[in-house]
């Protein structure tokens, strides 16, 4: 590499790779819709894995310290669930690791599924309708919420409808609030 920062054909600069990361995307499956779905899935799945591991580390630390006092900390039961992974208190550390990996994989899949479905639907609806508006957000959010409900442990018709309505509401609010803040 010379002083101007350019690279020859034999070697590629790490800086060039990083600067082109967001432009070219991670994957090239031959169609923008497929690229968008897969890229959204992979990125969100990674975020979901980090979130799951961080949450479990927090609950393990709180449980190990005997909880937080009521004077200035959060209560021990956050969200009504003291133990997110009952399998983490297994007899061996391999059972604990197995339970954490299983839970992290499930949450990663759920986050990736939500991002992939939502991103694919909004892109497809924009291309089909020729507009990106709140109507696309309602449909994409509702279908994404319903798909996420199907991945839950206690599946019911009411839960699917509730998740679809919640997904549509959050997606539409996000679309309408874009540009305000």
Image (cartoon, rainbow, N blue to C red):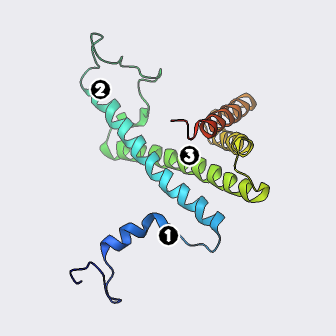
Residue identifier under label 1: 24
Query: Can residue 92 be seen by looking at this rendering?
Result: yes
Sequence order check, earlier mark of 2 and 3: 2
The quarter of the image holding the N terminus is bottom left
Mark closer to the chain start, 3 or 1:
1
Q: Are marks 3 and 1 in contact (CB under 8 Å)?
A: no
Give the structural element (helix, strand or loop) at label 1. helix
- Dot 2: within a 10 Å radius of its alpha carbon, few (fewer than 14), some, or many (20 or more) residues? some
Dot in front, 1 or 2: 1
Q: Does any portion of residue 90 appear in the rendered image?
A: no
- Residue at mark 1 to residue at mark 2: CA–CA distance: 42 Å
Depth check: give the residue in front, 95 or 38.
Answer: 38
Rendered image: mark on residue 62: 2
**Left or right of 75 in this view: 154:** right
The residue at 31%/83% (across/down) is: 7
| Residue 17 point in image, percent of width and height | 37, 72
Q: Nearer the viewer, residue 82 or 178?
A: 178
Q: Is residue 37 left or right of residue 164?
A: left
Spatial CA distance of label 2 from label 3 is 26 Å
- Residue shown at 55% from the left, 36% from the top: 180
Identify whether 25 is placed above or below 168.
below
Tell me the CA gap for discs 3 and 1. Answer: 25 Å
- Looking at the image, is mark 3 or mark 1 nearer the viewer? 1
* Quarter assignment of residue 164: top right
Query: Disc number at residue 110?
Result: 3
The residue depicted at 44 percent of the width and 52 percent of the height is: 46
């Amino acid at each position: 590499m010379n002083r101007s920062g350019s690279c020859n054909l034999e070697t590629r600069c790490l800086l060039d790779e990083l600067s082109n990361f967001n432009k070219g995307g991670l994957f090239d499956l031959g169609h923008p819709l497929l690229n968008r779905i897969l890229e959204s899935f992979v990125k969100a799945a990674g975020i979901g894995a980090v979130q799951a591991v961080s949450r479990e580390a927090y609950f393990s630390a709180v449980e190990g310290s005997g909880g937080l006092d009521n004077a200035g900390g959060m209560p021990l039961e956050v969200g009504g669930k003291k133990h997110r992974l009952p399998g983490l208190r297994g007899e061996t550390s391999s059972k604990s690791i197995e339970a954490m990996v299983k839970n992290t994989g499930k949450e990663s899949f759920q986050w990736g599924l939500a991002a992939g479905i939502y991103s694919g639907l909004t892109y497809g609806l924009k291309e089909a309708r020729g507009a990106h508006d709140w109507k696309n957000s309602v449909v994409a959010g509702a279908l994404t919420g319903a798909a996420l409900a199907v991945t839950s442990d206690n599946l019911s018709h009411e839960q699917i409808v509730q998740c679809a309505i919640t997904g549509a509401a959050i997606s539409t609010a996000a679309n309408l609030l874009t540009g305000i803040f």
